[in-house]
Image (tube, rainbow, N blue to C red):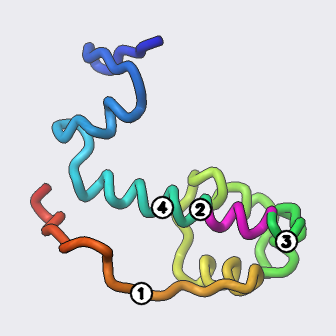
Amino acid sequence: MSVTINGEKYTTLSDYMNNETKVSKAEKAQIEFETALIGKLIEAREAKGLSQRDLAELSGLKQPAIARLESMRSTPKIDTLFKVLNSLGYTLSIVPVEHEPKPLANS
């Protein structure tokens, strides 16, 4: 199956994501980061046997806010992310990248 977007044919999301005229390296890196982060958050919630409602109660948020965060319909502020992760027994940390960082500004 393929889809046509603005007159261009794409077979997969990967085709679109790898087209640097459509998605810059910086945008792709951000999307990959957000996807991985939210994926880990969902895994942690499910591993603890918590529903979105349970997590909302533990973190002081409303269930629809958790749903928007998990579906990536909203980008959480740092304090919101901290509340959610802390409720799951996690935190954020800054660690060195495994490869030599490349400039993303003009990508």
Q: Nearer the viewer, residue 56 or 40?
A: 40
Q: Residue at x 56, y 70 (%)?
A: 76
Distance in Å between CA atoms under marks 4 and 3: 21 Å
Counting from the top left corner in percent of width and height, residue 101 is at 20, 72
Distance in Å between CA atoms under marks 2 and 1: 17 Å
Q: Residue at x 42, y 56 (%)?
A: 32
| Range drawn in magenta | 40-46
Distance in Å between CA atoms under marks 4 and 1: 15 Å
Reading the image, the residue beneath label 3 is 48
Mark 1 residue crowding within 10 angstroms, few (<14) / some (14–19) / many (20+): few
Q: Main secondary structure of the magenta part?
A: helix
Q: Is residue 62 above or below residue 79?
A: above
Q: Are marks 2 and 4 in contact (CB under 8 Å)?
A: yes
N-terminal of the pair, mark 4 or mark 1, is 4
N-terminal of the pair, mark 1 or mark 3, is 3
Distance in Å between CA atoms under marks 1 and 3: 24 Å
- Tell whether position 45 is magenta: yes
